[in-house]
Structures are given as structure tokens and as C-alpha cells.
Image: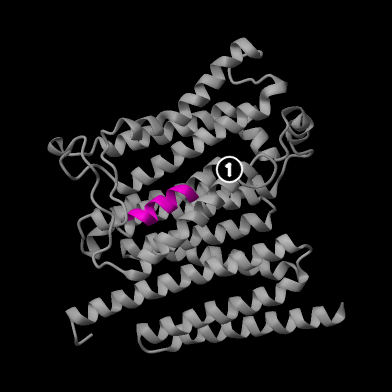
């Protein structure tokens, strides 16, 4: 009986995924992708991976979906027939995707006995670091280098988007995000929701130390609130030449790097923390990272500059 | 204890009924505005009943309050989304009265 909801969920995910691939219209495919992201986050909840579920809902469904929708709106419309690539290309794509799916299925269905895991070791020194959420321990203590590189990639992505700016607009502001027609309902939402949303975002970041949540999820919620305000036309996107904006973009990685290099003097190497200060250092790094993530995601959605600097 | 469980089952059952009715309406109603009506009713009443039914099951006051906050936020988001879709339909109709 308990298997039934899970089976229904799996069927829903598969249906939505196949529909996303099969549908011809670009925007429909993006909407399908968002639906798959939300359904996947439900699946992660069922697997007791609430951290992953939150990230999938915030990034996979929300932020990436919004980015793709914006990209769709910017692309030149093409007739549906010309979208299909060459048949050989399509067969190759199907073969490669099937091989990856089969490989993943094989790994899941035929686990190594006994399963290779570092979980007990990771969990063992949780108390030492003063954190209660094993995911955060892994992300910011054991695999901190991965997390650091992840944030640097975000900065690079933003630089990539900014390089698409036409020369005459360099340093200016991205195009306004406001809707074609102003809407009282959207304005009201953009005035009422951000105070609540900012509290929830900060709560997710702070809570990440001991419970599901963390910088990426919290930062995405903060970015969503900023984007909502920009879409309701209460604020314009900032000019990309602003020093304060650029400082916020690199704040997270810089604080992370400083904490990492400080490890050479105050602990035993790059990105290692002295046990007594581990928790405060991790909290400071997380706060800086969340701010940067929020600003970067907001500016990624806003896109390259489209107006000359004033 | 039993009474509380019966209340939960009745309220959640009512919520599920409204979701079912809303889904049927979404699939069967002829135009966008009526479909929107069906959808927002399912969100309002269906979700409202489910939260109402789950409230007596929450282990402490804080969890109950969280449920109420979630309900309020969903209301706000659903109402705004409904308004936006309806406004878009109105915009399309003014451009092309035949549609």
C-alpha cells in the first residue's frame, strides 16, 4: 500500500519527462522541465533527502526554469519542423542517453556489497564542527573545495552573460523585467511577499547548520524576492558597472577563499578550520555565499546590459 | 483521540474531493476563465480543507502555525497567479475579440 504513492510519483515523473522531450514548442518544453523539477523534488523528499529536494525545487524547478523561460522569450521564433536535428544526430543522442540511463540503473540495481560509504566517518566528527546537519558538514567541511568551485562557476556564468552585452551598452543596466501590462495583483504580491520571503531565505541559510536548508536554497529564495520586485516594476535592475554590485557578486567566493587560505595558518591546510572556530567560520562563509548567490542569480535572469549607462 | 482522527479524515477527504472536482473542471471546462475558476477553487477550498484537517494532528503549536503560514502563502501566490492569467486572457481578447 505504501508502494502505491511512490509508483504513481515515478509514473508522473516519467510521463512529464517524456512529454518534455517529445513536445515541439520550446516554451512548452521549458514548462515541462519545471514540472519535472518539482516532481523530482517530491521524489527526493520520499527518499528522505530533504536538502536535495529543497535545492531541486529552488534551482532545478525555479531558477533554471525562469532562466530558460527568459531565454525562450529572447530567441527568434522558428517553425517547428526546422527544430529537428539530423536523423543520425537524433539516433546518436538516443543511444548515448540510453547508455547513461542503463549505466545509472545498473549502479542502483546492483550495489556493491558492502556498499562503499564514507557516511559514518563524515557523521563522526559532526559534533567537533558544531553542526547538526551532515549535508552541511560535507558541503562546507569535507568537500569544501567542490562547494567553492561551484560558486566560482556561478561567477563565471555571470561574466559569460555580461560578455554578451553590446559595446554601446557596456556598464549599463539590463532590460527591464516588468510585464507588458502593469498588474495591481503582481504589485501587491511584490510588496507583501518580500518581507516574508527574506525571512524564509535567511531562515533556510541559518537553519542549514542543523536542519535541511542551506546557502543555495536560501540564496535562491532571496533572489526570487528581488526578481519579483523587479518584475512588478518597483525597482529597475541595477547597472552592471556598479562597484557595490560587483563586490556583492564576488563577496562569497572571496570570503570562502580567505577562510580557505587562513586554514594554512590557523589550522592544518587549505580549507581546514580549527575546531574551536569551525562553526562561526562556516556561518560567516555561508552568509557571504548566500548573498552572492542571490545577487548572481538575479543578475543572470536579468541578462546582459541593454541600456547605455547613465 | 478517535474524534480528532475522524475530523482529520473528513476534512482531508473534503479537500481531496475539491481537488478532484477542480481537476475535472480544468480538463472539461470550455474556456480559459472557467478553467481558471475551477483551478483556483481547488486551491482555495481543497488545500484549505487539507490544512484544516492536518492542524489537529500537528505535534506542537509551532508546526501548526507553520501549516497556517504555508496555507496563507499558497493563497497569496495562487490568487496572484490567477489574476495574472485572467489579465493576460483579457489582453488577448481585446487584441482579437473573435478568440
Q: Position of residue A255 (x, y in %)?
A: 50, 25
Residue furthest to the left in view is A168
Q: With respect to residue A86, does A257 lie above or below?
A: above
**Most common secondary structure along the magenta stretch:** helix
Q: Nearer the viewer, residue A122 or A112?
A: A122
- Name the residue beneath numbered marker 1: A205
Q: Is residue A301 left or right of residue A74?
A: right
**Side of A158 relative to B68 (left or right):** left
Q: Residue at x 20, y 56 (%)?
A: A76
Mark 1 burial class by Cα count in 10 Å: few <14, some 14-19, many 20+ = many
Q: How many marks?
A: 1
Q: Which residues are magenta?
A: A221-230
Q: Residue at x 59, y 28 (%)?
A: A144
Find residue B87 and report its image quarter: bottom left
Q: Is residue A33 above or below residue A140?
A: below
Using the image as rendered, state which of residue A37 and residue A129 is in the foreground: A129
In the image, what residue occupies the spot 60% across and 64% down?
Answer: B69
**Location of residue A107 (image quadrant):** top right
Q: Is residue A146 left or right of residue B85?
A: right
- Residue A133 in percent (x, y) is at 70, 40
Residue A260 in the image, given as x and y percentages of width and height = 56, 20
Amino acid at each position: 500500500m505504501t508502494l502505491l504513492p511512490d509508483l504513481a510519483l515515478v509514473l508522473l515523473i516519467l510521463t512529464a519527462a517524456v512529454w518534455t522531450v517529445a513536445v515541439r514548442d520550446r516554451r512548452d518544453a521549458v514548462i515541462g522541465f519545471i514540472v519535472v523539477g518539482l516532481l523530482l523534488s517530491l521524489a527526493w523528499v520520499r527518499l528522505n533527502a530533504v536538502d536535495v529536494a529543497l535545492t531541486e525545487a529552488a534551482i532545478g524547478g525555479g531558477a533554471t526554469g525562469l532562466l530558460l523561460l527568459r531565454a525562450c522569450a529572447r530567441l527568434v521564433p522558428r517553425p517547428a519542423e526546422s527544430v529537428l536535428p539530423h536523423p543520425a544526430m537524433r539516433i546518436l543522442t538516443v543511444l548515448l542517453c540510453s547508455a547513461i540511463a542503463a549505466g545509472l540503473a545498473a549502479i542502483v540495481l546492483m550495489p556493491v556489497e558492502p556498499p562503499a560509504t564514507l557516511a559514518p566517518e563524515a557523521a563522526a566528527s559532526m559534533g567537533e564542527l558544531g553542526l547538526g546537519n551532515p549535508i552541511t558538514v560535507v558541503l562546507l567541511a569535507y568537500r569544501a573545495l567542490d562547494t567553492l568551485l561551484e560558486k566560482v562557476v556561478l561567477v563565471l556564468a555571470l561574466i559569460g552573460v555580461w560578455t554578451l552585452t553590446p559595446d554601446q551598452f557596456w556598464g549599463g543596466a539590463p532590460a527591464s523585467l516588468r510585464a507588458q501590462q502593469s498588474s495591481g495583483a503582481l504589485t501587491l504580491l511584490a510588496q507583501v511577499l518580500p518581507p516574508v520571503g527574506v525571512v524564509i531565505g535567511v531562515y533556510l541559510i541559518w537553519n542549514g547548520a542543523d536542519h535541511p536548508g542551506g546557502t543555495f536554497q536560501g540564496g535562491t529564495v532571496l533572489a526570487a524576492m528581488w526578481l519579483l520586485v523587479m518584475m512588478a516594476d518597483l525597482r529597475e535592475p541595477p547597472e552592471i558597472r556598479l562597484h557595490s554590485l560587483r563586490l556583492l557578486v564576488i563577496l562569497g567566493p572571496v570570503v570562502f577563499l580567505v577562510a580557505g587560505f587562513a586554514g594554512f595558518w590557523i589550522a592544518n591546510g587549505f580549507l581546514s578550520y580549527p575546531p574551536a572556530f569551525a562553526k562561526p567560520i562556516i556561518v560567516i562563509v555561508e552568509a557571504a555565499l548566500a548573498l552572492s548567490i542571490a545577487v548572481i542569480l538575479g543578475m543572470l535572469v536579468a541578462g546582459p546590459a541593454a541600456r547605455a549607462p547613465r | 483521540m478517535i474524534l480528532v482522527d475522524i475530523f482529520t479524515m473528513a476534512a482531508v477527504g473534503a479537500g481531496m474531493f475539491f481537488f478532484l472536482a477542480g481537476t475535472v473542471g480544468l480538463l472539461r471546462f470550455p474556456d480559459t476563465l472557467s478553467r481558471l475558476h475551477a483551478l483556483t477553487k481547488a486551491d482555495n477550498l481543497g488545500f484549505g480543507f487539507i490544512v484544516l484537517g492536518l492542524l489537529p494532528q500537528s505535534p506542537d503549536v509551532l508546526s501548526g502555525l507553520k501549516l497556517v503560514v504555508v496555507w496563507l502563502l499558497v493563497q497569496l501566490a495562487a490568487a496572484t497567479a490567477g489574476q495574472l492569467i485572467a489579465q493576460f486572457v483579457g489582453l488577448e481578447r481585446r487584441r482579437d475579440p473573435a478568440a
